Image: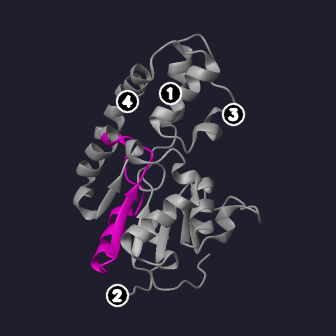
């Protein structure tokens, strides 16, 4: 699925579902959290909250599903349930470590932009030996309210780096985030669970430079040192 791509100077990685294989963890936490309160998880819940940070999700369930907890208590509950998985068990996606090291060897500026909290993300990055590989880190608590739902988030990153958006590559599993990055003019690389699944023509994945489920299949990228 490789298409022509221009040279890049910065690579922006998502974490959940992109670098780390966390499939099913949050679905399980959602089920346990709702069941504790005598409810089933609504069908729309995962899609609705996919790009929210933890505080936004807490506010959302309190407002829409009558959770009586404070946002802080809810976030702590979810964080406690997830911590052991991220700190000790969840694996990296295949080929992810080597690919990050490859980009680093090319002197590409590496960024990690995730809706995951710092408490969960940092222990996992340390376990994988990746924490020091990234030049910039933004966690869920650092993102604006719009977050990855907005192209502005990606444009702000490019502006802060003083890099043209078209010289940035974004690695994501979320169609919403991919669409935002594409609207910002960045090159996008889609990470999927099933490489054989059909991609709809109007899906942001169809507009990616490449789509893969194993970073060993990710394309080598032309690099630029232009200022």
Q: Quadrant of the N terminus?
A: bottom right
| Residue 169 horizontal/vertical position (percent) | 48, 72
Image side of residue 40 versus residue 158, left or right: right
Establish if 27 lies above or below 221. above
Residue 81 location, quadrant: top left
First in sequence, mark 3 or 2: give its number.
3
Q: How many marks?
A: 4
Residue at numbered disc 3 = 44
Residue at numbered disc 2 = 225
| Residue 197 horizontal/vertical position (percent) | 68, 58
Q: Which residues are magenta?
A: 89-118
Looking at the image, can residue 218 be seen?
A: no
Identified at 58% across, 75% down, the residue is: 209
Establish if 114 lies above or below 218. above
Q: Kindly state the secondary structure of the residue where label 2 is placed.
A: loop
Q: Kindly state the secondary structure of the residue where label 1 is placed.
A: helix
Residue at numbered disc 1 = 58
First in sequence, mark 1 or 4: give its number.
1
Establish if 22 lies above or below 205. above
Residue at numbered disc 4 = 79
């Amino acid at each position: 699925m490789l298409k022509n791509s221009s040279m890049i100077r910065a690579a922006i990685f998502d974490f959940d579902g992109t670098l780390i294989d966390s499939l099913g963890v949050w679905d399980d936490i959602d089920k346990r959290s709702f069941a504790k309160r005598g409810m089933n998880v609504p069908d729309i819940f995962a899609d609705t909250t996919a790009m929210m940070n933890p505080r936004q999700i807490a506010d959302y369930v309190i407002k829409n599903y009558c959770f009586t907890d404070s946002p802080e208590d809810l976030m702590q509950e979810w964080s406690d349930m997830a911590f052991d998985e991220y700190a000790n068990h969840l694996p990296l996606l295949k080929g992810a470590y080597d690919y990050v090291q490859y980009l680093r060897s090319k002197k590409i500026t590496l960024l990690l932009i995730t809706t995951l909290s710092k408490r969960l993300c940092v222990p996992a990055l340390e376990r994988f030996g990746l924490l020091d590989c990234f030049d910039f880190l933004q966690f869920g608590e650092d993102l604006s309210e719009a977050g990855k739902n907005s192209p502005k988030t990606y444009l702000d990153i490019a502006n802060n780096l003083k890099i043209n958006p078209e010289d940035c590559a974004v690695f994501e599993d979320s169609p919403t985030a991919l669409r935002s990055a594409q609207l910002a003019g960045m090159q996008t690389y889609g990470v999927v669970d099933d490489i054989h699944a059909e991609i709809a023509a109007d899906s942001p994945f169809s507009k990616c430079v490449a789509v893969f489920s194993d970073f060993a299949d990710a394309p080598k990228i032309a690099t630029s040192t232009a200022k």
